[in-house]
Amino acid sequence: MNPIRVFIISQEEPFYIPKVIGYLAQHQNENFKIVGATRLQPHRKNKTMKDWLLERTQIYSYWELFITTCFFLYCKVWYKLLSKFGVFNPFSVKSIYQKQNINEMVTDDINSSIYLQQLKNLDIDVILSISPPQLFGKELLNLPKIACLNAHGTLLPRHRGVFGSWWMLHDGDKEIGTTIHTMVEKLDAGKIVWQKEIPMPTNATQYAIAYHTKKIMAEGLVETLNQISANGLLVIQSPYQESYHRAPTKAQGKNFHKKGLRVVTFSNAKLTLSKNF
């Protein structure tokens, strides 16, 4: 049996996505092969980087913004300088693709007719959606032979929408986890094919939760692709109650901190700035 032909659509983000894709690439086997990938810019097409930053000021304290800036400088500036001297940059999705010899397909619109035709030429079985900033249109959703699968860092249908790790803390969840599901036009509403939970870490921050859920996600993607190869696409039922969230408001951000909760601390560097899982 030929390996499943997998294509990844994700974004250029330094903290977690390179670890997920690196893990997935390293665990390719006789069951699945990554035949290409697309790396989008982190902000959505209708939003600028300024909009992205303004969203964060709603929920980050100034100290947390400073910590995040330090983390970004370490990944984006220091390692970019080191890469000029031949040092591999583990915080770059582009560098992961190059190291793993994954062909990158460039576009600024994943629903454009030209891009869709390029994907059709790859004879794709599964498209993996790993935190892309653009929504999949109907034609893209129907393109792969088996399915488009989205990896979502919450226990769906709980916390559908955005900022899942933040809402898990805000709502006082006792467990965290990741869900992998088929994709339909409605956001985070496909059939669940894989799900795993772990207890909420002690003194967790949003960044710590993001690390743990992305680690589970990486393991789950490998398990799911191996499972599809062996037994096809299996659907499971989730025990969690449905909820949906948009980006938190400034008032909700203030309430979050009044509860003693934190988005990020310098101690999170050990997880966030680790080179792999």
Image (spheres, grey):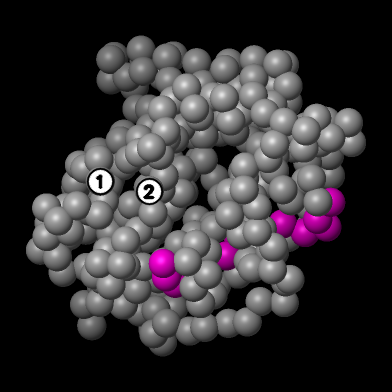
Q: Is residue 63 left or right of residue 131?
A: right
Q: Is residue 67 visible?
A: no
Q: In the rendered view of the protein, which quadrant contains the N terminus?
A: bottom left
**Mark 1: secondary structure:** loop
Callout 2: few (<14), some (14-19), or many (20+) C-alpha neighbours within 10 Å?
many
The residue lying at 51 percent from left, 77 percent from top is 191
Residue that carries the numbered disc 2 in the rendered image: 134
Q: Is residue 134 left or right of residue 238?
A: left
Residue 209 drawn at (x, y percent)? 68, 45
**Mark 2: secondary structure:** loop
Q: Is residue 45 magenta?
A: no
Please tell me in which quadrant of the rendered image residue 60 appears.
top right
Residue that carries the numbered disc 1 in the rendered image: 109
Q: Is residue 182 magenta?
A: yes
Residue 218 drawn at (x, y percent)? 50, 56
Q: Is residue 71 left or right of residue 10?
A: right
Residue 31 numbered mark, or none: none
Q: Is residue 86 left or right of residue 71?
A: left
Please tell me in which quadrant of the rendered image residue 107 appears.
top left
Q: Which residues are magenta?
A: 172-185
